[in-house]
Image (spheres, rainbow, N blue to C red):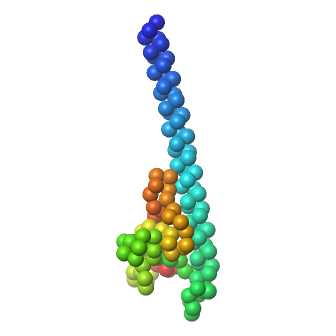
Amino acid sequence: MIMLIIMVLGSAAFLVSALNSSSLQIERDKKTADALAQAKDALIGYALTYGDTHLGEVHGYLPCPDTDGSNGEGSSPLGACGSQDISQIGRLPWRTLDLPTLRDGNSECLWYAVSGTYK
């Protein structure tokens, strides 16, 4: 009888912990989705207004990724970022986009890549 009670309590504890961990994963996924949506909106806005904020340029360009943090965390590097038509990968330049620090559900900075054609 005692073994049966121990097995039932163990099974109940396992089920509760499994449900708890799945709800934590759902919460992390929601936070990640919210951060990605906010980054997407900011990047589209940046591309739409690029020609207005950079005299003599056309609309549609995206900011360069933060590859090393040398210009401050979350900032695009000053000047050109790499060779023409060479894609870049790094962290999202949230400061350049006038965003708060965006982090995913695991509290990591968002990664960001831009095609060489659009930087």
As drawn, is 45 to the left or to the right of 67? right
Residue 105 position in % (x across, y down):
50, 52
As drawn, is 100 to the left or to the right of 80? right
Residue 18 position in % (x across, y down):
50, 33
Residue 29 position in % (x across, y down):
54, 50
Work out which residue is located at the far bottom of the displayed protein and give it. Answer: 56
Dividing the picture into quadrants, the one containing residue 34 is bottom right
Answer whether residue 86 is visible to the viewer in this image.
no
Q: Nearer the viewer, residue 75 or 50?
A: 75
Answer whether residue 110 is visible to the viewer in this image.
yes
Going 55% across and 40% down the picture, which residue do you hit?
23
Residue 97 position in % (x across, y down):
54, 73
Going 43% across and 82% down the picture, which residue do you hit?
78
As drawn, is 81 to the left or to the right of 52? left
Going 57% across and 56% down the picture, which residue do you hit?
33
Dividing the picture into quadrants, the one containing residue 86 is bottom left
Q: Nearer the viewer, residue 87 or 77?
A: 77
Work out which residue is located at the far top of the displayed protein and give it. Answer: 1
Task: Indicate whether 116 appears above or below 9.
Answer: below
For the image, the number of numbered tags is: 0
Task: Indicate whether 22 appears above or below 90.
Answer: above
Going 44% across and 67% down the picture, which residue do you hit?
91
